[in-house]
Image (cartoon, helix red, strand yellow):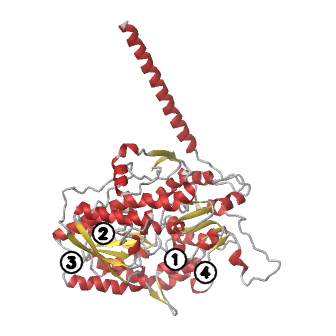
């Protein structure tokens, strides 16, 4: 009898193993099928694409569930990490996007840290502070989540935030710098400062900030704790010093991340037989390139005709395949999406200009021609209006556009690649106005450690509380409840942030012309926004006029930062 029971148990065990093996086999099959490179865009007007070498890489993504609305629910969800599974996709050539396996990691800060009710003072830029700190709940999930982050940091560390707000933005950069300088001379009443992204580099050049790399608290290079931008460190460090930092999870910085919005109805109407899944597959396969975007936008221009009235500017109502919006220098984003920068690191560990490199010039000229196509619109400040009205298939915009009311079916994609061989991952530049953190130079020893601790916990709690809520409120609830791939697009966009030394220091890298003061950053914008004539006809014309001036200024900045 005992032998029969043992035999029966062995049979059950064998059958169970077979079923599990089948399930695994099916999973692998499905993953392989989902990741198969599309190879071609199935569209009659497509020319044959160049064959690219395949190399498999991995993308880790996490599906977003309905988010908790209370502090207790958030704590419960975070602590129940076993309930949150990480989904892995195998995808096509050259794309490496690796969000952490744990979607909500906590900072490596001891729970024994307690500053005993210390009044923690911050200087805050009034143009960005409302997306970082709030005074009270208002019933909106985003606002309440920002406040919950503040409460958690205060309770966890035993501090009480005290904010001093002053006029900021790049127009008030000198006044903001003067306040930090005066505070430094007075022993510094500020433990931390929240600054506009163009102000923080000015403070660094003036020698008014601490080197954050000196901190043992800030996990700046820990890729498993993703609230700091690794690319900011790679693209802007001089002499090993980290003089300011920007996180990847605050509402303000998410708001400013640039991406490509897609009007799905317009896309499917112009590209018969294709749908959003084909776009997602292009992204996964590394074939979401500028050339393919232009191809998909072919013949999308629709000229509005009027029978009964004469319009003074009928282009205001026309529809376009691509809305490239030149407002605020957004056109520069295409340079970064292509994998290039205005500057490059040289063998001395300092930066020099790259805008005159042959490969960069070739791209700038090619894209200048592309922007002149009838299917492309680059009018200033029209992207939201055009997209909301259904008059743009693809629109370059920051994620903040999703915060407004959009009544059409849409999705978001990372900005397209230029060429597989030039850049092996997607790039997400940020529009001006994102948040940068600095610790004033007068903050010493233990006070410096305390400021770094607060900064680390603030950023980590943004990653844990704000980024998931931002996606839930502004993207998933609008269109993506049935579209899990949009979460993956959001993860790629957020994990691909890039920065540029030339753009960041543009406030102190201006050159004089007969009519205005222009930085190389703005000069590039003027080339792409223009009509191919005059002082900004092409990048070679501009560079011949400014090279001496901006090269000298960049060397001065490098010298000041190295002597910091």
Q: CA distance from mark 4 to mark 2?
A: 36 Å
Seen at 35% across and 57% down, the residue is 71
Q: Quadrant of the C terminus?
A: bottom left
Residue 329 shows which numbered tag? 1
Q: CA distance from mark 2 to mark 3?
A: 16 Å
Rendered location of residue 280, percent (x, y): 57, 53
Q: Are marks 4 and 1 in contact (CB under 8 Å)?
A: no
Image-based side of 368 in relation to 458, left or right: right
Q: CA distance from mark 2 to mark 1?
A: 26 Å
Q: Which residue is mark 4?
A: 530
Q: Nearer the viewer, residue 65 or 435?
A: 65
Q: CA distance from mark 4 to mark 1?
A: 12 Å
The outermost residue toward the bottom is 514
* Between discs 4 and 3, the one toward the N terminus: 3
Q: Are marks 2 and 1 in contact (CB under 8 Å)?
A: no
Q: Using the image, determine if residue 463 lies above or below residue 27.
A: below
Q: Quadrant of residue 376?
A: bottom right
Which one is closest to the eye, mark 4 or mark 3? 3
* Between discs 4 and 1, the one toward the N terminus: 1
Q: Crowdedness of circle 4 by 10 Å Cα count: few (<14), some, many (20+)?
A: some
Seen at 46% across and 61% down, the residue is 470
* Between discs 2 and 1, the one toward the N terminus: 2
Q: Which residue is mark 3?
A: 442
């Amino acid at each position: 009898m005992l032998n029969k029971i043992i035999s029966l148990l062995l049979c059950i065990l064998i059958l169970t193993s077979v079923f599990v093996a089948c399930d695994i086999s099916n999973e692998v099959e499905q993953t392989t099928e989902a990741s198969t490179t599309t190879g071609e865009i199935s569209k009659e007007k497509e020319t044959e694409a160049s064959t690219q070498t395949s190399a498999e890489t991995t993308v880790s993504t996490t599906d977003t569930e309905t988010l908790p609305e209370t502090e207790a629910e958030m704590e419960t969800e975070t602590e129940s990490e076993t309930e949150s599974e990480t989904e892995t996709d195998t995808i096509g050539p050259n794309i490496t996007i690796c969000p952490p396996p744990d979607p909500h990691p906590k900072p490596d800060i001891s729970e024994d840290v307690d500053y005993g009710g210390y009044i923690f003072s911050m200087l805050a830029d009034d143009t960005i502070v409302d997306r970082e700190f709030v005074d009270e709940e208002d019933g909106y999930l985003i606002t309440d989540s920002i406040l919950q982050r503040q409460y958690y940091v205060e309770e966890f560390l035993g501090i009480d935030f005290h904010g001093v707000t002053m006029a900021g933005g790049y127009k008030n950069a000198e006044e903001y710098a003067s306040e930090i300088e005066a505070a430094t001379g007075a022993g510094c009443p500020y433990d931390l400062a929240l600054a506009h992204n163009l102000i923080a580099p000015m403070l660094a050049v003036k020698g008014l900030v601490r080197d954050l790399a000196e901190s043992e608290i800030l996990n700046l290079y820990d890729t498993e704790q993703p609230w700091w931008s690794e690319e900011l460190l790679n693209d802007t460090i001089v002499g090993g010093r980290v003089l300011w930092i920007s996180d990847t999870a605050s509402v303000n910085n998410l708001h400013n991340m640039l991406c490509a919005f897609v009007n799905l109805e317009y896309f499917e109407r112009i590209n018969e037989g294709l749908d959003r899944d084909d776009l997602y597959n292009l992204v996964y396969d590394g074939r979401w390139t500028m050339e393919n975007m232009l191809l998909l936008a072919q013949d999308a221009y629709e000229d509005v005709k009027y029978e009964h009235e004469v319009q003074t500017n009928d282009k205001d109502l026309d529809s376009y395949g691509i809305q490239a919006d030149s407002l605020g220098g957004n056109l520069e984003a295409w340079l970064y999406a292509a994998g290039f920068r205005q500057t490059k690191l040289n063998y001395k560990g300092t930066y020099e200009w790259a805008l005159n490199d042959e490969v960069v010039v070739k791209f700038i000229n090619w894209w200048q021609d592309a922007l002149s196509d009838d299917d492309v619109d680059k009018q200033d400040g029209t992207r939201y209006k055009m997209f909301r009205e259904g008059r743009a298939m693809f629109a370059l915009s920051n994620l903040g556009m999703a915060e407004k009311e959009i009544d059409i079916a849409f999705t978001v994609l990372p900005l397209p690649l230029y060429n597989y061989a030039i850049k092996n991952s997607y790039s997400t530049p940020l529009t001006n106005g994102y948040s940068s953190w600095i610790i004033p130079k007068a903050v010493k020893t233990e006070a410096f450690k305390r400021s770094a601790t607060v900064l680390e916990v603030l950023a980590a709690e943004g990653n844990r509380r704000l980024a998931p809520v931002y996606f839930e409120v502004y993207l998933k609830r609008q269109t993506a409840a049935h579209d899990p791939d949009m979460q993956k697009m959001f993860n790629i966009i957020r994990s691909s942030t890039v920065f540029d030394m030339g753009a960041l220091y543009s406030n102190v890298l201006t050159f004089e012309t007969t009519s205005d003061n222009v930085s190389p950053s703005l000069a590039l914008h003027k080339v792409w926004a223009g009509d191919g004539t005059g002082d900004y006809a092409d990048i070679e014309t501009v560079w011949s006029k400014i090279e001496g001036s901006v090269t000298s200024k960049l060397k001065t900045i490098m010298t000041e930062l190295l002597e910091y």
